Amino acid sequence: MTRQFDPVKLSVLANAFDGIVREMTNGLLRSARSSVINTARDFSCAVLTADNQLLAAAEGVPVHVFGAGPLGEDMIELHDDIREGDAFLHNDPYRGNSHAADHCILVPVFVDGRHLFTAVTKAHQADCGDSLPTTFFATARDVYEEGALIFPCVRVQRDYVDNDDIVRMCRARIRVPDQWYGDYLASVGASRIAERRIKELAEKFGVDDLVDFVDAWFDYSERLAISAIEKLPEVELHGNTRHDPFPGTDPDGVPLQATISVKPKDGKITIDLRDNPDNLPNGLNLTRATATGAALAGILSGVPENLPSNAGTFRRIQVELREGCAVGVPKHPFSCSSGTTNLADRIVNVVQAAFSSIDDGYGAAEGASGQAPAKSVISGIDERNGNAYVNQILVGGVGGPATPFVDGWPTYQRPVCGALLYHDSVEVDEQRYPILVHERVLVADSGGAGRQRGGLGTRVTIEPRVDEVTLTYGIEGKLNPPKGVRGGHDGAEPHTWVEDLKTGERHDIPVVGRYDLKRGEKVVSITPGGGGYGSPFERDPEAVLLDVRDLRVSVDGARVNYGVVIDAGAVDVEATKRERSQRATA
């Protein structure tokens, strides 16, 4: 910095940029067309600096924004004539994006002819042109079988006017083009909101103050990160996990590991993901952005302090990746269609769980994941109006991880999203799509027992209201459910089956793939629970009693898992002491 920056002004401008991102978020949420955006909120907004550093993300989903810097790098590298009024469409996973379904709109923000910032919206599409009606094509053997339209940071607006060639390409390939175009306009509008608000800030404070603020804010965030790391012991942590077998993997699944080096004297943490399997012949491969984002999310969940999510903090966290690695930098044409979910969720879990081995008060258990039918992409023709539809529904959640201090959330959705995605409204989904949701309930005893309990799984039952509804899904965690840490129990595994409504006859469906749900059938989807933290015998018996009253834990589960004896709706204190004492010495 060339001068000392006023700390009050630093706080004002930091909150102003967060406010801009939140206004972008509200604008996109309220104007998008598809349910996956305007109901589930599967999108993120951010502001980058002109040199492509993450400045503000507010409530940005970690897998979307923690690795957002390369998006701006691609814009600068590929275009030497950027000017005011431009907008760029980017979804290339082999460059700086997450996966092809995340359409990014980048708007360079100019003040007095100078490029100062870049506004970014990243929104998960209901359809991106895949050969199957899904945006999570986990079984795609390569990007060609995946089939998505890929735009390597192409100019989609010049002088604030659409490039009609690009728009026509999307409308010709995407199954519900008006829905896509509405989402596209909403994303452009959100980025333009940031452009206007930043210009207003520059007019109020001056360009020099904004430039100096960026340096001061990053330096302040870096100091916070150094302070947090200095409090950690010098240690090398090793975490490992295993993704369930999917088509294109070994029969035993995908082994994953992370080595985390904590260097408090240097104020630095390194996460090494290079010693992992090579690219897989399916859609599970991560990208540079998603592998980086998952590792950073695991670190921020593992460190006790609450650190700003920006490039200043990330200066102190190094993620080491390898080209051609399933958890790293993908080689074309390996598919990354599910690169924001499965393996990325596992990396978040393995990193945050590894931190729990330092001591009580660090890290977190593993959170649940998977694209169960209650979270699947549904598609078909709605016989009520003759229109095609395709969208991801998020009717059921999964169990979140227990932390040293709180129980896991049942509305967690998945590790890479940091509990920021919303559940769909059942009523809205039933109006928009030809489905009937019979139930959405939490499953007792599904959260891993612990001093802090894992979040509960959800049971959802869905019936088609037309002849056929296609579900594209991927169930994960059945063989390797979310792990508990420091004596906490694992979360319950998922279960799914299809049932005949008349006879009650059940049959299983494949773990991953596509299922055409017929009239007269219903699919029952039970999602996994999150892992527990700490010994269940350390949980306050009154907290267990409250869980029993709230139907989160059964009476038998209270005794078997927690050693708490409940009689006539109250804790039997003496019987509980005996039960826990006997179990502790057994």
Image: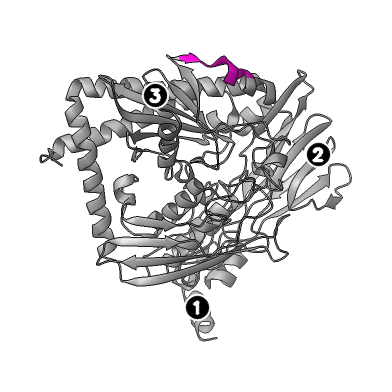
Q: Position of residue 515 (x, y in %)?
A: 79, 42
For disc 3, the marked residue is 82
516 falls in the magenta region: no
Q: Is residue 567 visible?
A: no
Comparing labels 2 and 1, the label whose residue is closer to the camera: 2
Q: Is residue 321 visible?
A: yes
Q: Is residue 429 left or right of residue 216?
A: right
For disc 1, the marked residue is 580
Q: Is residue 411 left or right of residue 190?
A: right
| Above or below: residue 229 compared with residue 103 | below
Q: Position of residue 483 (x, y in %)?
A: 55, 65
Residue extending furthest toward the front: 80
The number of discs equals 3
Residue drawn 42% across and 45% down? 66
- The residues bearing labels 2 and 1 have C-alpha atoms spaced at a distance of 49 Å
- The residues bearing labels 2 and 3 have C-alpha atoms spaced at a distance of 47 Å
Kind of residue at disc 2 = Asp
Q: Where is residue 167 in the image (x, y as percent from the top left)?
A: 59, 19
For disc 2, the marked residue is 516
| Above or below: residue 49 compared with residue 318 | above
* Residue range highlighted in magenta: 161-168
Q: Where is residue 481 in the image (x, y as percent from the top left)?
A: 61, 62
Comparing labels 2 and 3, the label whose residue is closer to the camera: 3
Q: In this view, does 500 lie to the left or right of 13?
A: right
164 falls in the magenta region: yes
The answer to which quarter of the image holds residue 333 is top right
